[in-house]
Image (cartoon, helix red, strand yellow):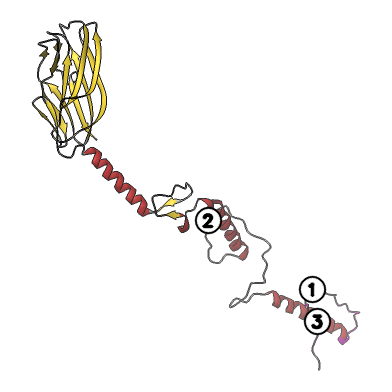
Amino acid sequence: MSNLEISEHAEIITEVEKLETSTPAHAATFNKIHEIFLNSVVALENKKVDIENGDIKETKVTEFTGTTEEFPIIAESEDVKTLFGKIKKFGNDFRAIRSALVTFGSIVDNSVTNRGDLAASARQVMLLAQQNTALNNSLNNKPAISAYLGSLFVKTNNEYEKLPLSSSVSKGTGLSLQNGNIVIGAGVRHVLISAQIYFFNNITLGSKEIDILVNTTLVARSYNTISANFKHFSVSTRLCSVSENNNISIHVKGHRGDEIQSYNHSTFLTVVAV
């Protein structure tokens, strides 16, 4: 007894001729119907993926279930359409941020690269922070001093006279006030110098000069003409090279009897190490 024939290209057939009471009860009729059923079952079997060890490499997904969730996570018991819909959405979300992601190959571990599209390593950031802290500490620890008159100073002649600075406010070490001079200490090599004088009362009108000297060398001068009492004159900030034990002083040329007020906000000599 032979078996029913199975086609090499078995297909699922959904239309089968209905048997009527007048249909001849012949083996050929029944065999035809049985072959349709058999080939449909084979076609279904060929398309089916086994629940265990099934191979879906030839399976085509023709429809995805969409989602608006950002970077969706796959969950248990989801159908294939939903699963692949989430995978597609995750891929599209990743593609949208890909250019902004920092990968290992785009991290720079040096201090010479200037490309704006590369990221610095944590080590370089830490080194930069340490250097910045050290620089700030260095700047904060630089000595500075402002020296003032202790009382009203009255000129005794029409020539240059050194102002007898006698009080000061300072920070750090390396600059001090001694005998009316600001004295340079060890380790200080450059300073910023500025000064101001308040010509107060009983002023003889005319020209006045303010000189700043390092030892006996003139490093800054301001020349002004006074037309009334109560005038402030200043010497602009000047960067100077100095050595240990140098003396910085302020000298005034005017007229005998000129009064220079001692207010510490009006008459002062300021030196800042840099």
Position of 218 compared to 113: left or right? left
Cα gap from disc 3 to disc 2, whole angstroms:
49 Å
Mark 1 element type:
loop
The magenta stretch spans which residues?
Answer: 3-27
How many marks the image carries: the answer is 3
Q: Nearer the viewer, residue 258 or 265?
A: 258
Residue 66 point in image, percent of width and height: 61, 56
Place of residue 179 in the rendered image (x, y in percent of width and height, measured from the top left): 8, 26
Q: Quadrant of the N terminus?
A: bottom right
- Give the residue type at disc 1: Ile
Say which residue label 3 marks. Answer: 35
Along the viewing direction, whichever of 101 and 200 lies nearer the viewer:
200
* Mark drawn on residue 13: 1
Q: Nearer the viewer, residue 208 or 32?
A: 208
The outermost residue toward the front is: 217
What is the three-letter code of the residue carrying label 2? Phe
Q: Earlier in the sequence, mark 1 or mark 2?
A: 1
The residue that disc 2 covers is: 71
Among numbered discs 3 and 1, the one appearing first in the sequence: 1
Q: Are marks 1 and 2 in contact (CB under 8 Å)?
A: no
Residue 250, located in which quarter of the rendered image? Answer: top left
On screen, 207 above or below 102? above
Magenta residue check for 152: no
Percent of width and height locating residue 29: 87, 83
